[in-house]
Image (cartoon, grey):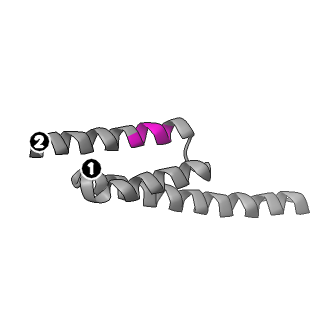
Amino acid sequence: MPHSKQAKKRMRQSEERRVRNKNARTRMKSSIKRALVDPKAGMVDAMKRIDKAAKGRAIHKNAASRYKSRIARAANRAAAASK
């Protein structure tokens, strides 16, 4: 339990950030799953969510690039398979 006023404030801030980051990651992961099931339909939304999560530092920028690369590869495979 925090004792000082500063520690109490820091605890509140940490909790707010934790909830915000968790929300961003959850929404991002859900959109990634949708994009992998149907790459053409969900790709744009997934890319947007990934970029927003990286911008807000909920995930690392290299992790964001990795996720985007996987989605793009899945979309390319789906496009090649449909031809």
| In the foreground, 59 or 1 | 59
| In the foreground, 41 or 2 | 41
Q: Is residue 69 highlighted in magenta? A: no
In the image, residue 30 above or below residue 80 = below
Q: Which mark is residue 19?
A: none
Specify the quadrant that holds the C terminus.
Answer: top left
Q: Amino acid at mark 1?
A: Leu
Q: Is residue 74 left or right of residue 5?
A: left
| Mark 1 nearby-residue class (10 Å; few <14, some 14–19, many ≥20) | many
User: Residue drawn 67% across and 61% down?
Assistant: 15
Residue named by callout 1:
36
User: Residue drawn 75% across and 59% down?
Assistant: 11
User: Residue drawn 48% across and 42% down?
Assistant: 64
Residue at disc 2, secondary structure: helix
Q: Is residue 76 left or right of residue 4?
A: left
Residue named by callout 2:
81
Q: Is residue 72 left or right of residue 62?
A: left
Mark yes or no: residue 29 visible: no
Q: Amino acid at mark 2?
A: Ala
| In the foreground, 3 or 79 | 79
User: Residue drawn 90% across and 63% down?
Assistant: 5
**SS majority, magenta:** helix
* Distance from the alpha carbon under mark 2 to that under mark 1: 14 Å
Q: Is residue 62 left or right of residue 71?
A: right
Residue 43's spot in the image, x, y percent? Answer: 33, 53
| In the foreground, 43 or 13 | 43
Earlier-in-chain disc, 2 versus 1: 1
Boundaries of the magenta span? 63-68
Specify the quadrant that holds the N terminus.
Answer: bottom right
In the image, residue 74 above or below residue 27 = above
